[in-house]
Image (tube, rainbow, N blue to C red):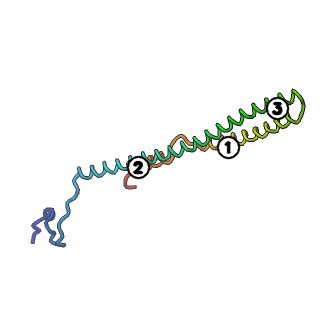
Amino acid sequence: MTDPYPAGPPPGQPTPATGAPRQEEPSLGQLLGAVTADLQKLFRQELELAKVEMRTEAVKTGKAAGMLGGAGFAAYMVLLFGSLALVYGLANVMDTGWAALLVTVVWAVVAAVLYVLGRSRMREVSPKPEQTIETLKEDAQWARHPTR
């Protein structure tokens, strides 16, 4: 006996073997639409990841800049109290001048600590979003070879 449906029954008609309706295969347009939607979603996710990375780096930069600003203020105080110490020391060599010099040394230590901390934090800042670049490379690799 020959099969009345050599390519299978029409869509929606039950198949003789299982009795279940035959499923339509998606058209090229539907497949292209699905791929386009997936690429749009991927692009939006990559863009969001880049934004998050840039915000994180901006926070690090702000903190490092604040410490460098603090070091600048402390250096200003070193000059101010150093000048006062020099004035008092030269005017009359008394305890007042040495006290001002001691305050100057304290401010010098504060300035040095803030500078070292700010410089080390500034070195940690990366201007480019490393994680986003890595995932974009992976996406490009996948797009070239989707079966791997």
In the foreground, 37 or 28: 37
Residue at figure coordinates x 50%, y 46% from the top left: 53
Point 24% across, 52% down: residue:
30
Amino acid carrying mark 3 in the image: Ala
Counting residues from the N terminus, which is met first, the one under dot 2 or under dot 1?
Answer: 2
Between circles 3 and 1, the one closer to the viewer is 3
Label 2 to label 3, Cα distance in Å?
Answer: 60 Å
Q: Quadrant of residue 57?
A: top right
- Tag 2 secondary structure: helix
Image coordinates for residue 102, horizontal then vertical, percent: 82, 38
Would you identify the image quadrant in which residue 114 lies?
top right
Task: Tell me the tag on residue 85.
Answer: 3
- Whichever of labels 2 and 3 marks the residue nearer the N terminus, that label is 2
- Under mark 1, the amino acid is Leu
Instruction: Decide: is 106 above or below 34.
Output: above
Q: Quadrant of the C terminus?
A: bottom left
Q: Which residue is mark 2?
A: 45
Amino acid at pointer 2: Gln
Where disc 3 sits, the SS reads helix
Q: Residues within 10 Å of mark 3 (few under 14, many from 20)?
A: many
